[in-house]
Image: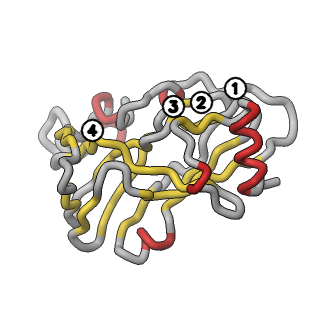
Amino acid sequence: MILTGPEIERRVGEGSIVIDPFDPSLINPNSYNYKLGAILRESTPPKTKSGTENARAWVEHRIPGDGFVLMPKRYYLANTMEMIGSREFVPILIGRSSIGRLGMFLQISADLGHLGAVHKWTLEIVVVQPLRVYSGMRIGQVSFWRPSGDIAPYSGYFGTHSHPASTPLDTTFDDSDWT
């Protein structure tokens, strides 16, 4: 069951959902608009130890006041401005439709959060045309869902990062992983 906007606000007030900083004006009928953080990581052309394309390196950018232009055929990681999470509800992060209509794909494969993970979430970003983004812009929505069954909080690799986090597989893949 999805929580309504007023229920999200109530749960933030009582502490069972964390959204920090929280702005009541960003509540929607069944979600909360989250903002883009200040750091972007841009992937470089991937290479493996043998020189074939695979493992990625990253260049980090701080978004300046006049924005940063994302370019097509590039892959970016960013983070939410807010700390978001809950030990009681499952967060799902998606892009805003208005951002999608500008040609941005957000949270391409990892929209499902985990119970117990409270941090600034890593965002996966690809654009189809040049697009200027700004730190603090409303970029996506988070909804909260009530789980059914026994609750086991997440304690894995991605549960604590508040910086745009790439996968540890970036540095451990080699050619044998693809054969």
Q: Is residue 101 above or below residue 140?
A: below
Q: Residue 154: percent from the left, percent from the top?
A: 64, 27
Counting residues from the N terminus, which is met first, the one under dot 4 or under dot 2?
2
Q: Secondary structure at mark 1?
A: loop
User: Where is mark 4, residue-wise?
Assistant: 175
Classify residue 82 as left or right of residue 175: right
Q: CA distance from mark 1 to mark 2?
A: 7 Å
Q: Residues within 10 Å of mark 4 (few under 14, many from 20)?
A: some
- The residue located at (17%, 45%) in the rendering is 52
Which residue is label 3 attached to? Answer: 119
**Residue farthest along the top direction in this orientation:** 155
Q: Is 86 on the left-hand or right-hand side of 128? A: right
For residue 12, above or below residue 94: above
- Quadrant of the drawing holding the C terminus: top left
Q: Is residue 107 above or below residue 119?
A: below
Q: CA distance from mark 4 to mark 2?
A: 33 Å
Inspect the image, locate mark 3, and give the three-letter code of the amino acid beneath it.
Answer: His
Task: Tell me, for residue 117, which label it has, or none.
Answer: 2
The residue closer to the viewer here, 155 or 83, is 83
- Of label 1 and label 2, which has the lower sequence position? 2
Disc 3 from disc 2: Cα separation: 6 Å
